[in-house]
Image: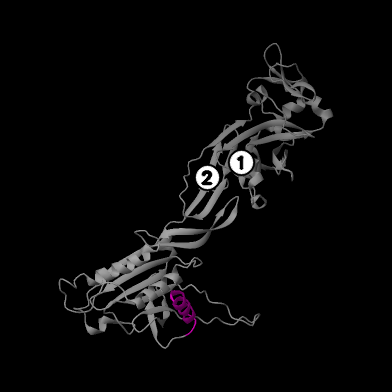
Amino acid sequence: MKKIVFFMVLSLVFVLSNTNAQTQNNSDKKTITMVANKIDADNVIFTPAPVKKKRNSQRNNQDTVSPYPERVEAYINFDKGNAYYTKGGLNALDSVYMMTFNSANNRFYKMTIIGYDDGEEITETTSSLARNRAIVVFKYFSSREETEYIIKRTPSSYVQSCVGEVNYYIKYKMPFDFQWINLYSLPAEERVENEISLAGKVHIIIEDDPEDCLGEYYDYDWPSQDTVLSGNHAQITIPKGSLEFIHHTKDTIPYSCTIDYKEFLSFEKLTSNYLLVPHKKQYIINAGYIVVSPEKKPDYSSCATKDTITPTIKIEVPIEKQQQAAGLRFYGKTYRPNGDVVYRAIATKKNKDKETKEVTLECYITPFQFDTIFLGKKVEEKEMSDYFYPAREGEPGAFEAMGGWLKPFKLNKQGDYIIKENMQMILRKPNGSYSAD
């Protein structure tokens, strides 16, 4: 029986009733034309009148109207002197609940409950009648979730940087206003509303108001603001949310996260533990590198939206005069279709300051290209001897390559660095003197 009544109410939303009422929507201050749908002689539900849409010239049909109203009002009847609703009142409450708390209803509602007495002289027995009636209606809605509050679940969605859009239900405590009014002292015109006697009634107003229902939308971004990391030489700008974000979630996510930054761009740091840029087929001479290790970053292999994540993280490295003609480029991780990682050149731009004449190399990367970004130059195997000296295992600066050991410099008896001319061009000058071989 309850379901039949509910579907009758829904169907009546789309047809005009003989009884019309104008109701002011307090949330957006616009007037909504409401139509009455009678459950019985004493219990009435008001819903917005259907709005006729202009016919689309490209289609032979009209735009459909959402079945979920932005405003619902109901007058629930109580027998004289009684603080519990009638059978007709229960049917009306069931219909309102099934309409507004429907699992597919994507509205965010707030509720106002106004209780009225019977309009008779107030006695010790009737003094709390209006309040008790309002409480009974409130308990009807709260009991549906067996809580002390009115709870609604609204289908919604959030966007996660590596997952995309995810549908889910937002469960929230419905805001409500609770009132009770004694009618005895009111004039006759104030005891009637929408041509309905308020005596023995509880008036329910349910309005769509996302801002009031949700309050602050908890948008999570890491980093939470544009972040600049600087060392002795390089500077990295990480825009807000470029490492991870979740937008439109009711979950509160802590922003506690660290980003470790190290740079190996000076001659001493670089050559004390030298390594070539890792690559299976090519030799890429390492002219310096930076390491950025954020606590949170997307995983390439499991990221469903990796193809849509654009390079927004900016790296800037000023280069010295002798490096400017060396053709240095940035190198970062590139993922093959099978998931293997290879270091390849990143689009590198050379900028020159008009006033200081300082030259800076610039590139943009994605968070997948952390942790290490190299600055370097690709050479053929036959060119390696133009940059490195043969070495023995254990020598300062020696590293294993090409089936043996190499080193980027050697020291003379005075402790000065001796560097091959090609190597001298791509590395920053060491502290102290040096000379080409």
Depth-wise, is mark 2 or mark 1 nearer the camera?
2
Q: Quadrant of residue 203?
A: bottom left
Q: Main secondary structure of the magenta part?
A: helix
Residue 323 visible, this angle: yes
Let me know if residue 28 appears in the view: no
Q: Residues within 10 Å of mark 1 (few under 14, many from 20)?
A: few
Depicted 71 relative to depicted 410: above or below: below
Residue 292 location (% of width, % of height): 59, 36
- Give the side of residue 30 with respect to residue 316, left or right: left
9 drawn magenta: yes
Q: Residue visible at 64% across and 52% down?
A: 305
Q: Residue 378: x, y in percent? A: 77, 35
What's the mark number on residue 355?
Answer: 1
Look at the image and give the residue range highlighted in magenta.
Answer: 1-15
Does residue 146 sit above or below 27 in this rendering?
above
* In the foreground, 112 or 4: 4
Q: Nearer the viewer, residue 262 or 319?
A: 262
Whole-number angstrom distance, CA of label 2 to CA of label 1: 33 Å
Which of the 4 image quarters holds residue 127?
bottom left
Residue at the image point whose x is 28% and y is 71% from the top: 133
Residue 92 versus residue 190: which sits nearer the camera? 92
Q: Residue at x 35, y 80 (%)?
A: 43
Q: Earlier in the sequence, mark 2 or mark 1?
A: 2
**Image coordinates for residue 240, horizontal then vertical, percent:** 54, 48
Most extreme residue toward the bottom, as rendered? Answer: 18
**Type of amino acid at the residue the image marks with label 1:** Glu
Q: How many marks?
A: 2
Residue where numbered disc 2 is placed: 223
Q: Is residue 23 left or right of residue 297?
A: left
Q: Which mark is residue 105?
A: none
- Whether residue 310 appears in magenta in the rendering, the answer is no
